[in-house]
Every structure is written in C-alpha cells, then in structure tokens.
Image: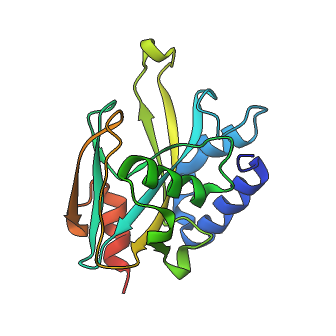
Amino acid sequence: MPPSTQHIRAVTEAYLSRYPHERDGLTPLFTALSGDDDPTSRKTFPTHVTCSAILLDHDKRILHIHHVASGKVLAPGGHNEKDDTGLPAAALRELHEEAGIPPGAVVAFPEFTDIPFDIDVHVIDASPSKGEPEHRHVDFRWLFRLRSEQHNVTLQAQEVDGYEWRPFTRAASPTIRAKLALLP
C-alpha cells in the first residue's frame, strides 16, 4: 500500500521544521493532499508525489542518469507504486530499477532517514501519447551513500540510456548543490 496522505503530510511538516522558508513553494503539494485522490498516483492531476535517490559515492560524487523519456540528466527516481512501503522505499526501488544498485548497497544519512533531503516541485510537459496533461511532480529527494567503494551501475535500458557520477558542485539541481555544500 502506498504512503498515506497523512504520512506524506507528516513527513512534509517534519521537512518544513528544518526548512521553514520552503513552505510557500510546497503549496501545490498541500493542495494535492487536501484532495480526494491518491497523491502518490501517477494519474492524479495536476500534482502528484514522486521520489528520487540522491546517491553519493565515497568521492562525494552524485549519481545522475540520462532519462530517455525526458531527455534530462537527473537523479534516479520516479513514480510511487502500490507496493512501496514508504517514500524512501520508493526512492530505493527506483534506484535499483534504473541503476541496478540494490537497497542493501546504500545507507541513508542518519539525519535524513525519515526526513527528505530536499523536496522539489517541477512542471512536467504534457504527454499526449500517455494521455497526460501538463502537471507537477512534487519530488521527495532522499539522501543515501554507497556502503562500499565498489559499485556497479546496470542501467534499465527502457528508461535510462546513460549515467555519470558528478561532483556535488555540478549536481543537476541547484537546491541539491546548495544543501550538500552545507553538510559537514
């Protein structure tokens, strides 16, 4: 069963206790949470929740993948599925599906086990072939690091056509760059 609306709201409020200046930017999320539709369903429009894994290696580089559908270079992530037991679990599932890195190969940063590292709201273009109008993703971004220096990336060919490890100073997301710069 996907995360409940109440759980998402509680996680968001915990996040906002750390980053209170971001509340106004999360208005689309609170609107979605007040509706009757499942906020984790990819068919809930105009806004639904997604999850991503911000994965650091031992050289403080971040894994980025080349998404086929969007043509963008992003952190591994995507839509929640009905069997996801929580928001971090959805991020870990996506990391495993898209990059072949199993959940057991990574560990969450202790201070970000239950609170996302970042929440980003971004617009997704309409996709007539999927029957999707323009909509917003509210992406809960969870911070992980590799357990060992050895890592094998095995791409999911249908969705990903490349990857790179970028220094955190070149992360695709400016908010991720800024927040990583503040970590010890």
Q: Is residue 84 left or right of residue 127?
A: right
Total marks in image: 0
Residue 183 placement (x, y as % from top left): 38, 81
Residue in the picture at 30% in, 57% down? 153
Name the residue: 31% across, 47% down.
Answer: 155
Asked whether 33 or 74 is in front, the reply is 74
Residue 45: where, in percent of width, then height? 60, 27
Q: In the picture, residue 88 is in which quadrant?
A: bottom right
Q: State the residue at coordinates (45%, 68%).
A: 143
Q: Is residue 45 above or below residue 24?
A: above
Colour scheme employed for the rendering of this structure: rainbow
**Considering depth in this image, is 74 or 25 the residue closer to the camera?**
74
Residue 69, quarter of picture: top left
Horizontally, residue 55 falls left or right of residue 11, namely: left
| Residue 91 location (% of width, % of height) | 51, 55
Query: Is 125 above or below relative to 66?
Result: above
Task: Name which residue lies at 76% across and 49% down.
Answer: 4
Which quadrant of the rendered structure holds the C terminus? Answer: bottom left
